[in-house]
Amino acid sequence: MKSHYSLTDAQFEQQFANAVLDPAVFTHEAHLRLAWNHLNQYGLETAIEHVVQQLKHYTKAVGAADKYNETVTIAAVYAVQHFKIRSSSSDFVTFLSENSQLKTNFKDLLNTHYQTNIFQSAHAKATFLAPELLPFD
């Protein structure tokens, strides 16, 4: 299987935005990379708008619209932002290496912010739920 790392940032973003990226390549790690790239280019608010819009389009185009989760999508961008502002990394690979909990402990990270099981909640899938326990930075 080809990895998202075989693509440059521009290729990765273009293929994703055009919904032609192989779904097998769009892993959790690739989702984090998408957030990282958009945060670097556009800042938090615009990154959230772009990632939400593009992910909705992508999941629909690949027949996986039922897997889209608004709260997890936005919370992931906030999580990447949280670690990004504390990091001196200039590239995603180094950033993820320094902040491996984003990859290996993501659900637990988000569970520190939410009492609701946002991964299973139909409401959380459909609309962004603000954190109940700990606000995002």
Image (cartoon, rainbow, N blue to C red):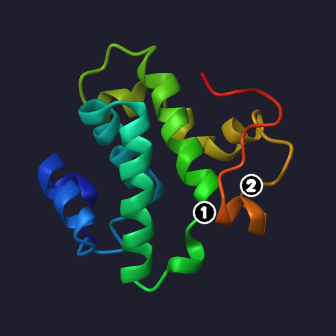
Quadrant, the N terminus? bottom left
What amino acid type should be assigned to the residue bearing mark 1?
A: Asn
Helix, strand or loop for disc 2 = loop
- Residue positioned 34% across, 30% down in the render: 43
Closer to the camera, 103 or 87? 87
Q: Do the residues labelled 1 and 2 touch (CB within 8 Å)?
A: yes
- Left or right of residue 18: residue 107: right
- Left or right of residue 96: residue 104: right
Q: Position of residue 100 (x, y in %)?
A: 50, 33
Q: Which mark is residue 83?
A: none
Residue at the disc numbered 1: 69
Q: Residues within 10 Å of mark 1 (few under 14, many from 20)?
A: many
Which sits earlier in the primary sequence, circle 1 or circle 2?
1
- Residue positioned 82% across, 36% down in the render: 132
Q: Where is residue 81 in the image (x, y as percent from the top left)?
A: 46, 28
In the displayed structure, 114 sits above or below 7; it is above
Judge whether residue 8 can be spotted in this image. no
In the displayed structure, 79 sits above or below 121; it is above
- Residue positioned 54% across, 52% down in the render: 73
- Residue positioned 24% across, 22% down in the render: 90
- Left or right of residue 8: residue 50: right
Q: Where is residue 91 in the image (x, y as percent from the top left)?
A: 24, 29
Quadrant, the C terminus? top right
Instruction: Say which quarter of the image contains residue 93.
Output: top left
Residue at the disc numbered 2: 118
| Furthest residue in direction bottom, as rendered | 63
Mark-to-mark CA distance, 1 and 2? 8 Å
What amino acid type should be assigned to the residue bearing mark 2?
A: Ile
Q: Residues within 10 Å of mark 2 (few under 14, many from 20)?
A: many
